[in-house]
Amino acid sequence: MHEIIETLSGDRQQHIDRLVEWLRIPSISTDRQRKGDVRRAGEWIMGELATSGFDARLDETEGHPVCFASWTQAVGAPTVLIYGHYDVQPPEPLELWRHGAFEPTIEGDDLIARGATDDKGQVLALVRGVCGVLKHRGSLPVNIKFLIEGEEEIGSPNLASYIKAHSKELTADVAVISDCSQFAPGIPAITVALKGLVYLEVFVQGPNRDLHSGSFGGAVENPANALTRILGSLRDEEGRITIPGFYDDVRDLTPEEREDFASLPFDEEAFRTDLDVPQVHGEAGWTTLERKGARPTLDINGLLSGWTGEGAKTVLPAHASAKLSMRLVPDQDPRVIETLVSDHLRSLCPPSCTIEVSVHHGAEPVLVERNSHWLEAAAVAVEKGFGKTPVFIREGGSIPVVSDLKKILGIDTILLGLGLPDDNAHSPNEKFHLPDYQRGIETAAWFLDEIST
């Protein structure tokens, strides 16, 4: 293993070059005009795996294709399914990027580009580590399957049906995903819980056309006013969600779990300073870490109405809309929450307007089994790859495929965070800390060694 690690370390520049090449492909899954680029990114990772000795192919779905690759010659050994995604978020607002979003640029030890950490950089670290072992040994100590999709950033609408249709091929003992982060710089982590998700869009319609606010103001309901009243009522001043029934199924933290949160080396003042906010804010009665990782949330993700261009236009808009996301915790059911929130929004609409609620996508919350051989092996691998014992954390984000893998294939998932909390995922100037990229590559190699013993 030490020879393999030395070889992987010596190939450091090659690892970076390959990632840079992949990051140049603008694989924005939500943009229909980028459909060809999304496919090109899928073909790129398929070629990377095929060249390295995997049986690899690109499978069609009703949307963007899925890359499936396998090496299953380790008779009697465990099988690991590695998941990742090659699609990325839109880069807007473009003016906030220091460089082009798809012009990968190294600043110090950071590689800046859309997809650098979410998720091209993290999944390629696993690919490079596994393929490095295969290249050096000519074989692998365990069986490996890769499932790398192109629709994660739009809610993976076709992934569950793909997994069901290919369940025999995808059979494995455990899954591994690197699409999350470490706890902090120098503090590697394994994620043991993910929040679920419900994403809605709300449309409020007023008059049949935009009106002069002087001529019609006070006589016709302004849908922007109506929508902001509705949205403003969804949380109280202490941050608690006011929707009846929203908290009914929430599994509260045990005293032991709260002690685990309290034991993490979290500097709230540094957190606040980094974000440049006057003070932290959230649901009363819970710490910042508990709110982030273990309490449900409701947030407005976007608002649109009226005149938003330069200068003034005294308009009473005809319609207003908002995008909302709710992050869920065990044992909340996305389908129940979707209905609760949708019905509540409709009940708040004044009779002077009409309202429509559209559901985009969702995901179930996840708790990882802490007492497992796989988790122990991952912890040892992280310690060898990063040089420090990992902490176990809860993540506020959602990865829908984790619950799909459990439901359909019956397997648990190990969540290895290789990125950092300040990597700007989904934001301008997304980055990946290159030393962590290298450590992730070596951790992947160590993990194969650990689970084979």
Image: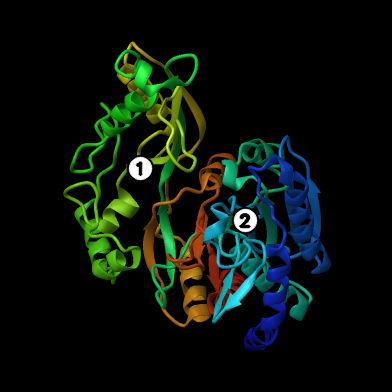
**Percent position of residue 164, x then y:** 66, 37
Tag of residue 7: none
The quadrant of the picture occupied by the C terminus is bottom right
Rendered residue at 68%/63% (across/down): 23
Residue 201 in picture, x, y percent from top left = 47, 30
Marks 1 and 2: CB-CB under 8 Å? no
Tell me the SS state at disc 1: loop
Q: Is residue 17 visible?
A: yes
Q: Quadrant of the N terminus?
A: bottom right
Which sits in the foreground, 135 or 59? Answer: 59
Three-letter residue code for mark 1: Pro
Disc 2 on helix, strand or loop? strand
The residue closer to the viewer here, 440 or 22, is 22
Check the image and report above or below for 364 versus 257. Answer: above
Q: Is residue 347 left or right of residue 81?
A: left
Image mark for residue 330: 1
Residue at 69 percent of width and 61 percent of height: 144
Q: Is 283 above or below relative to 17? A: above
* Residue 187 position in % (x across, y down): 40, 74
Residue on which disc 2 sits: 84
Position of 351 relative to 386 (above/below): above
Q: Earlier in the sequence, mark 1 or mark 2?
A: 2
